[in-house]
Image: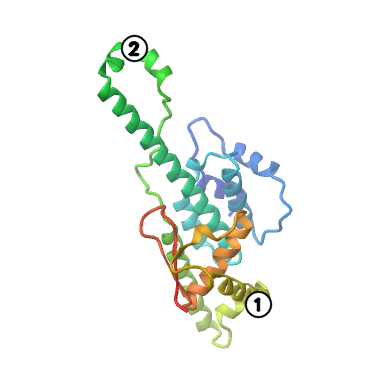
Amino acid sequence: MEKSEILRAIIRQGENEDISEYEEILNEANENLVYPDIFSETVSKVFKLAMDGKIDPWKIDILQFKDLFFSEPEPNFEVAGLLISSAWHILYEKSIAMIRGYNSNKISDELTDDYPEIEDSMDDDEVSDFIDLKEPVMHEDKRNVTLIELLDSIKRVYKKSREEKTIKDTSVDINEDILMKSNKEDIEEGINRVQEEIKKYINPFFLEDYWGKTTEERSEFLLYMLFLEKRGRISMEQNEPFGNIIITKLF
């Protein structure tokens, strides 16, 4: 897919907005990173700009990102950790904004209930000055996607890719193929390091408490945790949408 097609798919545009504006923003974003393909580069930059506040997170369609990622002929799992981490951050920012908006509306309702004369004595212009009329962004046609749904989808595609690879060549395992691309020794070293690190954590614990501060640290930690979860060393669950990821050690 071309960059413009990817942008049109994952960014919700307003009536007077042109997708070329977003292309210019992406082109101005200087990064010293080498991406394996145009999809990974475009999505990664969009997510980074959203986290930096240069693109409104509400304009990012996470559901479309998921569909596009898994429509790729060969999904690139090497950058999956980074993209998932970025997607989670955007969902988190959206949920925080919704909670703040809900609390603000609740407080406003309580004030008018306790002091009805405030509402009666103000005209429309005064009310608009008194209350922050931020228009809530609601999408009736699509719902938000939780991190667990993204992880489950990746697992399904990962399993399907492995089965298809086995049919084509039973002598090559998809797991080994991915590890070879990412430098197997470094991956194994990272997995072992993270496993040793979480040994000292009280069971269960929240992923967000230990996964680092930068996007790179978080994506790396999440990727290694996914390997540990696949090997049956830990379990990962999320009890409510946008809630913390609960890690339980099984070793």
Q: Distance between the Cα atoms at labels 1 and 2?
A: 68 Å
Horizontal and vertical percent for residue 215?
61, 54
Q: Residues within 10 Å of mark 1 (few under 14, many from 20)?
A: some
Horizontal and vertical percent for residue 80?
56, 62
Direction from residue 123 to residue 68 in the image, left or right? right
Q: Earlier in the sequence, mark 1 or mark 2?
A: 2
Q: Quadrant of the N terminus?
A: bottom right
Answer above or below: position of 16 versus 234: above
Q: Which residue appears at 31% of the width and 16% of the height?
A: 118
Taking depth in this image into account, of 43 and 183 the one nearest to the observer is 183
- Name the amino acid, label 2: Asp
Answer above or below: position of 168 versus 182: below
Provide the secondary structure element on which disc 1 rests: helix
The number of numbered discs placed on residues in the rendered structure image is: 2
Q: Which residue is mark 1?
A: 184
Horizontal and vertical percent for residue 17?
54, 33
Q: Which residue appears at 53% of the width and 45% of the height?
A: 8
Q: Which residue appears at 39% of the width and 41% of the height?
A: 99
Residue 2: tell me if it is visible: no
Q: Which residue is mark 2?
A: 123
Taking depth in this image into account, of 83 and 142 the one nearest to the observer is 83
Q: Residues within 10 Å of mark 2 (few under 14, many from 20)?
A: few
Horizontal and vertical percent for residue 49?
60, 44
Provide the secondary structure element on which disc 2 rests: loop
Picture quarter containing residue 241?
bottom left
Answer above or below: position of 9 versus 172: above
Q: Which residue appears at 54% of the width and 61% of the height?
A: 210
